[in-house]
Amino acid sequence: MHDGDRVTFDDVTYRVYELGPGGDCDANSLWIVETSPKAAFIGDLVFNGTHSYTADNHLLAWLANLEQVRNLLADVPILYPGHGQPGGLELLDAQRDYLLAYCAAVKELAAGKPSLSQEAKEQLAARMERVRPVAGLTFLIGLGADAVAAELAGGRLER
């Protein structure tokens, strides 16, 4: 499949949109059901009710993708995320708010450095647990901290 392609299975037509980097990996796509009832499968663009995997060096592109897909999804009432329960466009807002809170916390704790100390990662985890209390996948909070710090510092974390 390529960006904009359509495919039909059992009288249900899907259109795929290639988003590229900017979700929790390098290859994100969006599948919109064009037949009634309209719905979209948004993959790892949204982590609903869990902490997000941010270690792929594309957090800023992720934020851009969340805004880009808003127009594509404007008339789609139900979104199925890669993680968590389905919902509406509010899922995009919640993911954006989470990522912005994560960026702000990492930026402050890194103080311009491309990585965080272990103590700073623990502080980050405590902050993000307040942003999304009782959310699953808490181990992901610290896992992506250095990648995001490096991205915000203008570099890329080498693995």
Image (spheres, rainbow, N blue to C red):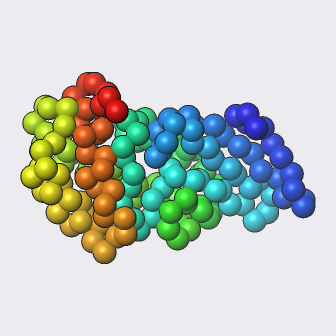
Residue 78 left/right relative to 85: right
Residue 23: x and y in percent read 47, 44
- Res 113 seen here: yes
Who is closer to the viewer here, 148 or 3? 148
Q: Give percent across and percent down for residue 16.
A: 71, 43
The quarter of the picture where the C terminus appears is: top left
The answer to whether residue 52 is left or right of residue 143 is right
| Residue 38 found in image quarter | bottom right
For this orientation, the residue located farthest to the top is 155
In the displayed structure, would residue 123 be above or below residue 20? below
Residue nearer the viewer, 75 or 16: 16
User: For the point 28% across and 55% down, which residue is it?
Assistant: 141
- Residue 80 is situated, as x and y percent measured from the top left of the image, at 59, 62
- Identify the image quadrant of residue 108: top left
In the rendered image, the residue lying farthest to the bottom is 134
**In the rendered view, does 134 fall on the left or right side of 118?**
right
